[in-house]
Image: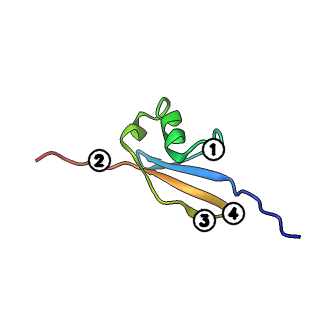
Amino acid sequence: MLLATQLPRVFILMDKGQVITLTDPNPKWSPQAVLNFYSANYPIVTTAKISAPVLKDDAVQYRFETVIGTKG
């Protein structure tokens, strides 16, 4: 018999040179909803983009990537 299981999701955020691993608040939420959820505690993610999911360490990993540019 073949069983399908859903892999856990992990969300990664880089903030001030530190890697912050965020847990999945609700597996039924879209990655965008998770980003919105964490934006209250991590304002840097309000301008972040979500990377394509990557399978790593038996989990589906998403990265919240911020682009900090300079004017000029």
**CA gap, disc 2 and disc 4:** 31 Å
Q: Nearer the viewer, residue 19 or 34?
A: 34
Determine which residue is flagged by label 1.
23
Disc number lying in front (2 or 4): 4
Label 4 residue SS: loop
Q: Position of residue 3 (x, y in %)?
A: 83, 64
Tell me the amino acid under the disc marked 2.
Answer: Ile
Question: In terms of secondary structure, where does tag 3 sit?
Answer: strand
Identify the mark at residue 55; answer none if there is no mark: 3
Taking the image as shown, residue 4 lies to the left or right of residue 45, namely: right
Q: Compare marks 1 and 3 and give the one earlier in the sequence.
A: 1
The amino acid type of the residue labelled 3 equals Leu
List the single residue furthest toward the bottom.
Answer: 1
- Residue on which the image places disc 4: 58
**Which mark, by number, is residue 68?**
2
- Category of crowding for the residue at label 4, using alpha-carbon neighbours closer than 10 angstroms: few (below 14), some (14–19), many (at least 20): few
Q: CA distance from mark 4 to mark 1?
A: 14 Å
First along the sequence among labels 4 and 1: 1
Compare residues 4 and 26 and report the one nearer the observer. 4
For image coordinates 61% across by 51% down, the residue present is 10
Left or right relative to 10: residue 44: left
Q: Earlier in the sequence, mark 2 or mark 1?
A: 1
Give the CA separation, mark 2 to mark 3. Answer: 26 Å
Q: Secondary structure at mark 2?
A: loop
Work out how far the residue at label 2 is from the one at label 1, CA to CA, in angstroms.
24 Å
> Which label belongs to residue 70?
none
Task: Tell me, yes or no, whether the two marked residues, 2 and 3, touch with CB atoms within 8 Å.
Answer: no
Work out how far the residue at label 4 is from the one at label 3, CA to CA, in angstroms: 7 Å
Name the N-terminal-most of marks 2 and 4.
4
Image x and y of residue 69, in percent: 24, 48
The kind of residue tagged 1 is Thr
Instruction: Name the image quarter holding residue 1.
Output: bottom right
